Image (cartoon, rainbow, N blue to C red):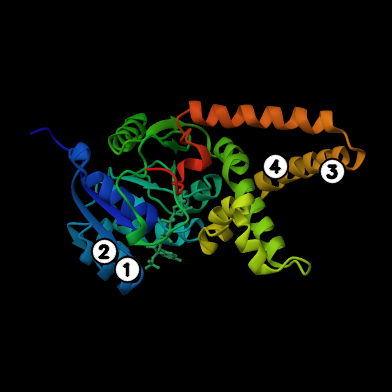
Amino acid sequence: MTVPLFDTLAIIGPGLIGSSIARAARAARAQNAVRSIVATARSPKTRARVVELGLADRVVDTNAQAVEGADLVIVCVPVGACGAVAKEIAPHLKAGAVVSDVGSVKASIVRDMGRHLPSTVNFVPAHPVAGTEHSGPDAGFAELFENRWCILTPPEGTDPEAVAKLAAFWRLLGANVEVMTPEHHDLVLAVTSHLPHLIAYTIVGTADELESVTRSEVLKFSAGGFRDFTRIAASDPVMWRDVFLNNKDAVLEMLGRFNEDVAALTKAIRRGDGAALEEHFIRTRAIRRGVIEAGQDTPAPDFGRPHGHEE
Ligand code: NAP
């Protein structure tokens, strides 16, 4: 039998992402990723649920107990809570351990966790670009990371061997891996994830506050496009609060550009400039094709939703 990549994996915060890591690490194809999994959550309720679901070999009460002797520690809590968790686990970490996270923002994580972690461990922040609008240990599934990207943002001077080992771990979970600086990550994700979420939160809020169109009409006729925004706008409020608080500059930069583009389209509509509108929509349709060609969505119509007449 081959030696596992990491002997013991500690998962702190087995919600959607943490529990998916546990499930994926245990899945047959990843059996050599880790030998044993220990998990902990702040609430007794989540800890009890993780025991019921059988997601870990051991479920312990504290973060300190979880990291004791662990070779890979993955902190899976909201971005704003990562610094406090790092401070708490720092004295209990095994020398040589790889410490990582899954936060959707990276520069603030490098700052907030990095300042507490001892030089005896290898800190390799990570962000699996995969998720759903659901939360908690029941929401996770082993295939979540299949053919999705996991971005690693090691601070300067990190041991390349530790980075390679964490990259190998994520590949065993089905992900593709890319390495970049935390600042670049935050800029890329501001446009691919954070801005779309902000737009969805805005549109859904706007529709809810109309006086001339009733809420029941909005819901009834939502298949016209609105419902696709409601999925994103149903994402976890605490997680997304922390994303915007911690990626402020990049989001404001992208929002500034977005507002300029909205102004240009507003002008085209006001002036009846059909050519400008059509040209814009031709460009965006090509981007949709690019997403499908990159294997990041299904080519099936309507996001592959089943319709009445289909088998
Ligand atoms: P989740 O399902 O809500 O799970 C969050 C976990 O963190 C739970 O175990 C929760 O414990 C714990 N937690 C919450 N607040 C905490 C605090 N203040 N201190 C300590 N523990 C706390 O969230 P998730 O969607 O897995 O997100 C976790 C991380 O993954 C976030 O950093 C997020 O940015 C990142 N991420 C999310 C997605 C996504 O689509 N959801 C995608 C990629 C990355 P209890 O259950 O005991 O409350």
| Residue neighbourhood size for the residue with mark 2, other residues' Cα within 10 Å, grouped as few (<14), some (14–19), many (≥20) | many
Q: Which mark is residue 254?
A: 4
Q: How many marks?
A: 4
Q: N-terminal of the two: label 3 or label 1?
A: 1
Drawn side of residue 174 relative to residue 271, left or right: left
Residue farthest along the bottom direction in this orientation: 44
x then y, percent, for residue 192: 58, 40
- Give the amino acid at mark 3: Thr
Q: Which residue is mark 2?
A: 50
Asked which quadrant contains residue 242, the reply is bottom right
Name the disc covering residue 46, or none: 1
Depth-wise, is mark 4 or mark 3 nearer the camera? 3
Whether 169 is drawn above or below 226: the answer is: above
Query: Are discs 2 and 1 less than 8 Å apart at CB?
Result: yes
User: Residue placed at 21% from the left, 44% from the top?
Assistant: 27
Q: Which mark is first along the chain, 3 or 2?
A: 2
- Identify the mark at residue 266; answer none if there is no mark: 3
Give the class, few, some or many, for how many residues have Cα within 10 Å of label 3's Cα (few <14, many ≥20).
few
Q: Residue 263 appears at what percent x and percent y?
A: 83, 43
Q: CA distance from mark 4 to mark 2?
A: 38 Å
